[in-house]
Image (cartoon, rainbow, N blue to C red):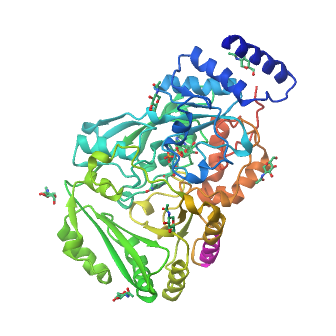
Amino acid sequence: MRSIATTLLQLVCLLLSLHRSPCSGAAATASNFSSCLVSNGVSNFSVPTSPGYAGLLHSSIFNLRFTLPNVAGPAAIVLPESRDDLRRAILCARARSLAIRVRSGGHSYEGLSYTTENHVPFVLVDLANLNRVRVEPGSATAWAESGATLGELYYAVGRSSYSLAFPAGSGSTTGLGGHVSGGGFGLLSRKFGLAADNVLDAAVITPDGRVLDRSSMGDDVFWAIRGGGGGSWGVVYAWKLRLVPVPRNVTAFTVGRTGPVELIAGLLHRWQYVGPNLPDEFYLSVYAPTGSTDGNVSISFTGQVLASKDHALSVLSQSFPELGLTERHLSEMSWVESTAKFAGLSTVEDLPNRRRQPKQYSKSKSDYVQAPIWRNDMAEIVRHLSTGPTGSIQLDPYGGAMARVRSAETPFPHRAGNLYSIQYGVSWNRSEVARAEEFIGWLRSFYKFMAPYVSKDPRAAYVNYLDLDLGVNNWTQAAGGSSAQAVARARSSWGEAYFGGNFDRLVRAKTVVDPGNVFNNAQSIPPLNIRAEE
Ligand SMILES: Cc1cc2nc3c(=O)[nH]c(=O)nc-3n(C[C@H](O)[C@H](O)[C@H](O)COP(=O)(O)OP(=O)(O)OC[C@H]3O[C@@H](n4cnc5c(N)ncnc54)[C@H](O)[C@@H]3O)c2cc1C
Ligand SMILES: *[C@@H]1O[C@H](CO)[C@@H](O)[C@H](O)[C@H]1NC(C)=O
Ligand SMILES: *[C@@H]1O[C@H](CO)[C@@H](O)[C@H](O)[C@H]1NC(C)=O
Ligand SMILES: *[C@@H]1O[C@H](CO)[C@@H](O)[C@H](O)[C@H]1NC(C)=O
Ligand SMILES: *[C@@H]1O[C@H](CO)[C@@H](O)[C@H](O)[C@H]1NC(C)=O
Ligand SMILES: *[C@@H]1O[C@H](CO)[C@@H](O)[C@H](O)[C@H]1NC(C)=O
Ligand SMILES: *[C@@H]1O[C@H](CO)[C@@H](O)[C@H](O)[C@H]1NC(C)=O
């Protein structure tokens, strides 16, 4: 019965599609898509009427803003179990003219891995089951499927050797698919660069279902996938990563300081001269939450040093005595233990646990600082911050290896000349959802207030700290199409902010690998030469 009904529906869809009117009913498209999956042997998928659908959809939505009822869900969620499943899922979605969204860790700040613009019907390809990591300690390399999380990668590396590590971000549930695609900054980046700087090879599924490696994808595409942002190039099935050497123990610490605005501004002012100029073995960042208590504000410093406590203490007490670091702040531990600590986990065993994920409603923005902010201005900034709704700024020191990579070597352009990045965020909980616009409004006004102190022309931003306020593509079809105007708009609104002078090379790479713009999202790279969809 069901299959006859399905076939009839498909026939109707087919007839309608001959008249170029959209086949109404996402259900019809989805069932057609489902039958394509089934006939190709892809068995793990879920449609809106399946019992597990909502649970799967929400499983890795990190930003709860995108769980609200105004956000349209996918026509189907597919969980490929193998590279071939992944290829077939892409081909089925294309054959059915469904848009494709690929999700690894689901940490996109703007939900781009599981939403579409203008309610275009789409398939969510969730890589959660493609999470195998194979470490080869002998050659200090690893192949990691891109659905693996950073926690899963760190755990696998830590188990294989205490003297190997991988330089990437600190959230344990962040996915390798999106993270490495956008660069990937972390506590080892001043010593070893970004995650993307340590990619040796990759397997990429193209819009027409081919599998490319480094040599077959060509230089422009291999360059583009290492920092040009996720979702534009095809699906990265797996990354080959270069592992880096670390001492048996590293030194880790967190130091909180509380005091009046002037005192805290003094510490932040001083940090600007220290953090970016320490030896490469040192990472020292600042986290400053909004708000104040009885006139006092609080900040905390996070440090990781690839050396002993004694060495860390002697260098930091000399270069930054105001920090007030003492021996009791410092602990020595293996690198993998430090990744658990900085991810907020109590044990290394929690690193691969995908459910240890504090979800929240949030909005973020980012900036780069290229000249130290004056002390009086810093006090104004701290004062402004102290009046905000729940939120924070995070200052990450650059310099070291970050400054030794040329800006054009990868799409990520924020290299020499950048002292530190700022990540701004506000977050709220369920009971405050009605006030979301007020909180986001505060964030935007703070960002405006910061304009004189940060990079200009363009005002730079980090693509992994995605911010749709910078502008959007606004595609209206499954395969986005494109136009010279779309390229120009993308360049001047967010393209140059994220990629500086690298934007045009990204457009060239996109035009080679995905001229029909199958892999698109609100801030994907548009192709220049337009080939109509067949
Ligand atoms: C808690 C938290 C901590 C973070 N910490 C850091 C940090 O320390 N350093 C840092 O640099 N950034 C950090 N980020 C930002 C993070 O790097 C980005 O949000 C990143 O894009 C997330 O990757 P994902 O796979 O988890 O996200 P997803 O939402 O799954 O994907 C993000 C984008 O990449 C695309 N994509 C996903 N998988 C693939 C794939 N296999 N092939 C092609 N495209 C793909 C998606 O379609 C989407 O456009 C953090 C974010 C969060 C929420
Ligand atoms: C699905 O629909 C398309 C047109 O929309 C049609 O060409 C195709 O035959 C259908 N697939 C199946 C399996 O019926
Ligand atoms: C599909 O994958 C999900 C996520 O890993 C898993 O929970 C589920 O059991 C799988 N379903 C089937 C039928 O294999
Ligand atoms: C403010 O911080 C200072 C330390 O700088 C501390 O001595 C003082 O007690 C704090 N005041 C309040 C009200 O917490
Ligand atoms: C590493 O640190 C741990 C915990 O402090 C300590 O017990 C161990 O002796 C250290 N190992 C080395 C080789 O320094
Ligand atoms: C939500 O946040 C507000 C403000 O921070 C707080 O007062 C309230 O207790 C929180 N509610 C829940 C359910 O966490
Ligand atoms: C996006 O395009 C749709 C359809 O053309 C239009 O209605 C909408 O206003 C556009 N949105 C933006 C932000 O440009």
Q: Which residues are magenta?
A: 444-452
Indicate whether residue 476 is drawn in magenta.
Answer: no
Residue at 24 percent of width and 37 percent of height: 138
In the image, 278 versus 523, the foreground residue is: 523
Query: Left or right: where does residue 104 sit relative to residue 442?
Result: left
**Residue 244: x %, y % from top left:** 31, 49
Which quadrant does the C terminus fall into?
Answer: top right
Residue at 49 percent of width and 35 percent of height: 127
Report which quarter residue 398 is drawn in: bottom left
In the image, 463 versus 476, the foreground residue is: 476
Residue at 53 percent of width and 44 percent of height: 223
**Residue 278: x %, y % from top left:** 34, 71
Does 171 appear above or below 214?
below
Does 339 appear above or below 126?
below
Does 294 appear above or below 316?
below
In the image, 117 versus 199, the foreground residue is: 117
In the image, 341 versus 296, the foreground residue is: 296
**Residue 7: x %, y % from top left:** 72, 13
Query: Left or right: where does residue 142 sit relative to residue 487?
Result: left
Majority SS type along the magenta span = helix
**Residue 502: x %, y % from top left:** 60, 53
Residue 198 visible? yes
Residue at 70 percent of width and 42 percent of height: 527
Which quadrant does the N terminus fall into?
Answer: top right
Residue 418 visible? no
Query: Left or right: where does residue 158 sit relative to residue 271?
Result: left
Query: Left or right: where does residue 291 sit relative to residue 92?
Result: left
Q: How many marks?
A: 0
